[in-house]
Image: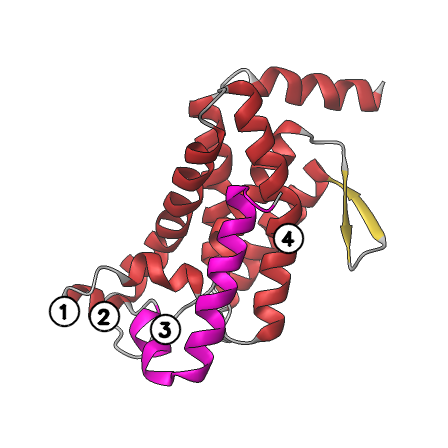
Amino acid sequence: MLNSVSFILIVITTGISLLAWQKPNLLELLTLNPYRIVHKKQYWRFLTSGFIHADFTHLFFNVFSFFFFGVQIEQIFGILFPGLGNILLIIFYLLAIVISDLPTFFKQKNNPYFNSLGASGAVSAVIFAGILFFPVEKIYLFGFVGIPGVIYAGLFTWYSIAMDKRGGGNVNHSAHLYGGLFGWLFITILYPQVWLTFFQQIKAALW
């Protein structure tokens, strides 16, 4: 476990977040700011914004969620593609950080005051990947409310779209939504047979 990519990503994310909280200038430098990316060519913000968080609660929920689903997906990748599980998870996770923020980037690229941070887009991608492999396994909200994964995905998508249209606040719901959709797209390209077992599991649960 200690040498798994999932654990290493958690340690790196936690370490960078803790350091950035102590250094406001560093936090600002790593945050996603579409305007600065366009006008000052600070392209690193696409990636670094996924390794910092607003506060401990924000960090905890992302790390907690990724701990369970990241380890699961890493093991699945290792079974499907022996010897490549670790590198596939790294590629998947880093791509998810960037791609989940692209819609926000294009929407806010002329807004110098917009900032976004957090690994939520990448974590959503990993969660949705897990749902694709195990659609009827329950996801427990707040530790005790169990919802089948496929239903959770539908509710999560609806909520993210509704909150993104509503706007306001500091949560980038668009990144949550597009991160989840990217998770499904990545797995579909990597292992399209997953959809066969996806529907077989749902059918078995219903009948």
Amino acid type of the residue that numbered disc 2 sits on in the rendered structure = Tyr
Mark 3 vs mark 1: which is more N-terminal? Answer: 1
Q: Nearer the viewer, residue 39 or 160?
A: 39
User: Residue at horizontal 38%, vertical 84%?
Assistant: 24
Q: Which residue is mark 1?
A: 39
Q: Quadrant of residue 151?
A: top right
Spatial CA span between label 1 and label 4: 35 Å
Is the residue 128 above or below the residue 106 in the image? Answer: above
Verify CB contact (< 8 Å) between mark 4 and mark 2: no
Q: Quadrant of residue 117?
A: bottom left
Q: Quick one: SS at disc 4?
A: helix
The magenta span reads: 2-31
Amino acid type of the residue that numbered disc 1 sits on in the rendered structure = His
Mark 1 vs mark 4: which is more N-terminal? Answer: 1
Camera-side mark, 4 or 3: 4
Spatial CA span between label 3 and label 1: 15 Å
Amino acid type of the residue that numbered disc 4 sits on in the rendered structure = Ser
Q: Which residue is mark 2?
A: 35
Spatial CA span between label 2 and label 1: 6 Å
Camera-side mark, 1 or 4: 4
Decide whether the magenta segment is chiefly helix, strand or loop: helix
Camera-side mark, 4 or 2: 4
Is the residue 194 above or below the residue 132 in the image? Answer: above
Residue 89 shows up from this direction: yes
Q: Which residue is mark 4?
A: 65
User: Residue at horizontal 63%, vertical 28%?
Assistant: 133
Verify CB contact (< 8 Å) between mark 2 and mark 1: yes
Amino acid type of the residue that numbered disc 3 sits on in the rendered structure = Asn
Mark 4 vs mark 3: which is more N-terminal? Answer: 4
Q: Which residue is mark 3?
A: 115
User: Furthest residue to the front?
Assistant: 3
